[in-house]
Image: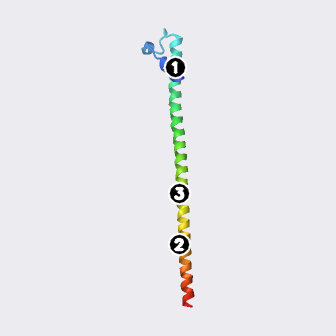
Amino acid sequence: MSWVQAASLVQGPEEERDVFDEEADESLLVQREWRSHMQRRVKEGYRDGIDAGKAVTLQQGFNQGYKEGAEVIINYGQLRGTLSLHFQCHHLSGDLTHQ
């Protein structure tokens, strides 16, 4: 049995009694304290899980975007270099015919 399930089992009909009632037994107080601790741990675990999930998702998105961006930039650089080469060759051949 997980501790989350165990925390939910400590609730009982005695829950409506006053915490400071002199007749309340030690067991009830321990159960309430246990449940309170478990509820806090569940909330903390949930928050930690959300934070971890955000970090993983952010890193995965960055990795994917970086890969796609690198591919685009490489293609752009090759195209720009090719066009520059053609422009320079055309420009040089034009200069040679005018001399």
Tell me how far mark 2 sits from mark 1, CA to CA.
Answer: 70 Å
Q: Is residue 27 above or below residue 57?
A: above
Q: Earlier in the sequence, mark 3 or mark 2?
A: 3
Q: Is residue 33 above or below residue 63?
A: above
Check the image and tell me how it is coloured: rainbow
What residue type is disc 2 on? Answer: Leu
- Residue for point 51% across, 35% down: 47
What residue type is disc 3 on? Answer: Gly
- Residue for point 51% across, 28% down: 42
Tell me how far mark 3 sits from mark 2, CA to CA.
Answer: 21 Å
Image quarter for residue 89?
Answer: bottom right
Q: Which residue is mark 1?
A: 6
Q: Percent position (x, y) of residue 15?
A: 44, 15
Do the CB atoms of the residues marked 3 and 2 lie less than 8 Å apart?
Answer: no
Question: Which of label 3 and label 2 is nearer to you?
Answer: 2
Q: Percent position (x, y) of residue 88?
A: 56, 78
